[in-house]
Amino acid sequence: MGLMARVSTIFKSKVNTVLDKAEDPRETLEYSYQKQVEQLQNIRRGIAEVVTSKKRLELQVSRLQQSVSQQDDNARDAVRANRDDLAQEALSRKQGLEAQVGNLNTQIEDLAREEARLNDLQQKLQTKVESFRTQKEVIKAQYSAAQAQVKIGEAFTGLGEDMADVNMALQRATDKTEGLKARAAAVDSLADNPAFQNDALPGSGDSIRDELNKLKSSSSVSDELAKLKAELGQGDNT
Amino acid sequence: MIVRILTEGQYRVEGEMLDSIYQLDEELMDALTQNEAGRFHELLNQVAGLVRSGEHLPIEHLVESDLILPAVDTTLEEAKKFFED
């Protein structure tokens, strides 16, 4: 069996849980409609949450960028005072902060995509719910309970699929924002704490890789220091 | 056949196109079980491309799908998790 057939099977079981079935099919229509309206509200909440997370990250980026320029100033002052050790320290912090800014920007892009996706789903669902509402009124007005049962069938499953689809998208977006919340606290302390050290960054769990990363970072610090000295007219005279 | 691409919408796909989709779909499942993320991603997009060449059903149509394709940016991990749940 291919992937799509398997996904369908699993999905159908989800569909059965998103909509309530009642004894009287006309009641089923009403319950389902209520659920749809609730789900539209859920999407709106989901979008608001994604937007809040994104704003928070953007705020962090601007704070980290301030710290970056602060460290840059520190490095310049240190070079002018002939304190290479301090300059190296400042540049190393600066690079660590820049790496964080890069990470955050990736996450901001990711959230922007989620936001667009949810907005799109919201509009589609809105249209579908409206269509369901019209069909519901027609069925209620024109059919007996037994006939309504048949009529409802397909619209019901079709819409159930859409709702299960939206649920999954919402879950995905929530998972992402939850994951970011945990990281956000760590980044906050990074921007606040002037004694931030590169060593405080979590290791990759691979000691060789960590060691190599340190080497790489220390050589890029030396590069940047040399550049800074040249810029300030304090080339290495030794 | 009505095929749904999650978060995108539904399409009516028939004939040879459907055969190609079935074939790629088998490979897609294979990529998933073999943990080949790159191939999985590529095939997912390929299948989605074929499905999109079918007739796009209007949003206000409420019909059941015969086949469902995950959203095209679904990662291998997410797909696996979906089957575990």
Image (cartoon, grey):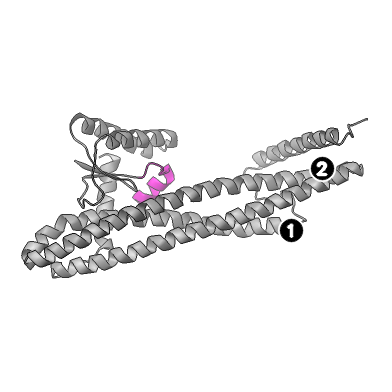
User: In this picture, is A160 found above or below A237?
Assistant: below
> What is the magenta range?
B71-85
The residue under label 2 is which amino acid type? Answer: Gln
User: Residue at (10%, 59%) from the top-left corner?
Assistant: A150
User: In this picture, is B32 found above or below A176?
Assistant: above
Nearer-N-terminus badge (1/2) = 2
| Apparent side of residue B75 relative to residue A85 in the rendered image (left or right) | left
User: Residue at (22%, 34%) from the top-left corner?
Assistant: B18
| Apparent side of residue A217 relative to residue A180 in the rendered image (left or right) | right
Element under disc 2: helix
Residue A55, horizontal then vertical, whole percent: 56, 57
User: In this picture, is A150 found above or below B3?
Assistant: below
Dominant SS type (magenta): helix
Q: Chain of mark 1?
A: A
Residue A138, horizontal then vertical, whole percent: 13, 62
Circles 1, 2 touching at the beta carbon (< 8 Å): no
Q: How busy is the neighbourhood of tag 1: few (under 14 within 10 Å), some, or many (20 plus)?
A: few
Q: How busy is the neighbourhood of tag 2: few (under 14 within 10 Å), some, or many (20 plus)?
A: many
Element under disc 1: loop
Q: Chain of mark 2?
A: A
Q: Which residue is mark 1?
A: A193
**Does B84 lie within the magenta span?**
yes
Instruction: Give whichever of A99, A147 is nearer the camera.
Output: A147
**Does A188 lie within the magenta span?**
no
